[in-house]
Image (tube, grey):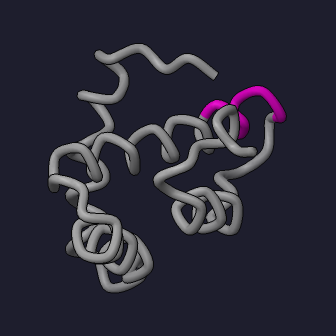
């Protein structure tokens, strides 16, 4: 799925908000993993996380279902690979 750059820029602040929320601690853990073990720059990591959020939101809209936090967690876990980049 090709995600427009302006959509990613729009979602980065949402990811930053999730970093501070206690109920989305998994988002902070993902950022720490990407900037630590994966050695990505913070902005690059945030943009990848925003792409995962965009994919989850798109799936929500297309399916007409509520936000699937399990799917979002799974996408974050697989980063830096995104679904269309997976082997």
Left or right? Give the position of 38 relative to 63: left
Q: Residue furthest left?
A: 42
Corner quadrant of residue 47: top left
Left or right? Give the position of 28 relative to 16: right
Corner quadrant of residue 63: top right
What's the residue at 72%, 36% (across, down)?
A: 59
In front of the other: 44 or 22? 44
In front of the other: 80 or 12? 80
Image: magenta residue range? 58-63
Position of the C terminus, as image quadrant, is top right
Quick check: is 36 in the magenta stretch?
no
Q: Position of residue 29 (x, y in %)?
A: 36, 80
Q: Is residue 72 above or below residue 29?
A: above
Q: Main secondary structure of the magenta part?
A: helix
In front of the other: 85 or 19? 85
Position of the N terminus, as image quadrant, is top right
């Amino acid at each position: 799925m090709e995600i427009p750059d302006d959509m990613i820029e729009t979602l980065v602040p949402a990811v930053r908000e999730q970093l501070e929320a206690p109920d989305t601690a998994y988002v902070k853990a993902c950022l720490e993993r990407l900037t630590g073990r994966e050695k990505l720059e913070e902005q690059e990591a945030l943009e990848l996380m925003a792409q995962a959020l965009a994919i989850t939101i798109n799936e929500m809209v297309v399916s007409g279902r509520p936000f699937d936090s399990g799917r979002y967690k799974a996408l974050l876990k697989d980063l830096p690979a995104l679904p269309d980049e997976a082997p």
